[in-house]
Image (tube, helix red, strand yellow):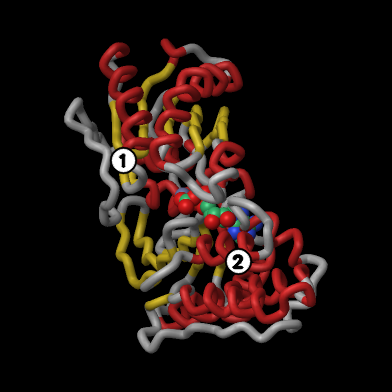
Amino acid sequence: MDAVTDSLWFTGSILAIETSCDETSVAVLEGPHVLANVVASQVDMHRKWGGVVPEAAARAHVEAIVPTTQEALTAAGIGLRDVAGIAVTNRPGLVGALSVGVTFAKGLAFALSLPLVGVHHLEGHLLSPMAEPSTIMFPHLSLIVSGGHTEVVWVDAPGRYQLLGETIDDAAGEAFDKGARLLGLGYPGGRPLELLASGGDPKAYALPRSLPADPYHFSFSGLKTAMLRLVEREGDELRPADAAASLQEAIVDVLARKALRIAEERQAPFVSLVGGVSANRALRARLREGCERLGIGFSAPRPDLCTDNAAMIGLAGSIRLARGERDGPELDSLAQAPLP
Ligand code: KG4
Ligand code: ZN
């Protein structure tokens, strides 16, 4: 297993930009050191619709991108003239939202004659633990759990990825969000559901564990339906904390069981847990315990790097810029894209 070395990183300050969904985020990094990571969230706006409205998201990024950049530079104690490279999420995501960050990044790179690189959003999540390089080893198996993705990826080294498995329907974050919505917890529901679950009994209600025949596939749509039936059946008798705890347990149980089985089968020396749902303490604890039992190393990003942020895009971008990768004015925003 290889530890992370210094030569991986681009020399000089990197400005990183993330606008793939509902957070406008700008970060400043030097190597793996995150000097600033500002996240301007739109969730209050989207909450009233119960989800992200793409057109409104793009418009909100337009309003937030300049002040968020100014705030990140001020927090890092540098000026625009001190920036040496630019990294921007260009795929996958909402095209209108992505285009705001990509167009802004291209403009800055052109005006300041700076190198620019487009970053795959999931590569950002995969490399987010590298903000603390001593906590991660390569190769490793990574479980990405976010609002849009549930994937198991073999990470040979930064930039070398193999997708092993994914969800065949809903993502794990969607299961949290839809369950939270049924319990009247608003959007996004993962964090409030976790808080409510902490006062509940995870064994109170029997919810199904969907274990598709293919060990590399996940499925959460059946759980969503079962949760709906539970809420309808119990009506006013429903104990919300118990329902939240039972739902969280069903999601955590499936994710941990499958990821650990794949880790064992692939003889992974190390496992990482990344993406917005990796902020969930029950999931972190379950995977950590499982890895310890198997004698496997385990890492998850610090809480502020779990949900969408530009620092993780800067980490991936720094490594790509250090390798000489460059994108030009043709850099496009893509709704779908495989891992690089
Ligand atoms: O990675 P992310 O910020 O955005 C995407 O790329 O999708 O993930 C957002 C997802 C949402 O579904 C949110 O409910 C979930 O992460 N989430 C959580 C927690 N914090 C965020 N789910 C469970 N427990 C949490 N503490
Ligand atoms: Zn994400």
Q: Secondary structure at mark 2?
A: helix
Q: Earlier in the sequence, mark 2 or mark 1?
A: 1
Residue 176: image location, x then y, percent: 58, 63
- Please tell me which residue is depicted at 36% across the width and 34% down the height of the picture: 88
Of residue 118 and residue 239, the one placed in the foreground of this image is 239
Where is residue 152, by image quadrant? bottom left
Residue 120: image location, x then y, percent: 33, 46
- Please tell me which residue is depicted at 61% across the width and 44% down the height of the picture: 304
Where is residue 248, by image quadrant? bottom right
**Relative to 118, residue 86 above or below:** above
State the CA–CA distance, disc 2 to disc 1: 27 Å
Of residue 151 and residue 169, the one placed in the foreground of this image is 169
Quarter of the figure with the N terminus = bottom left
Instruction: Specify whether residue 187 is in view.
Output: yes
Circle 2: residue type: Gly
Tag 2 near tag 1, CB within 8 Å: no
Q: Identify the residue under disc 2.
A: 179
Residue 161: image location, x then y, percent: 32, 59
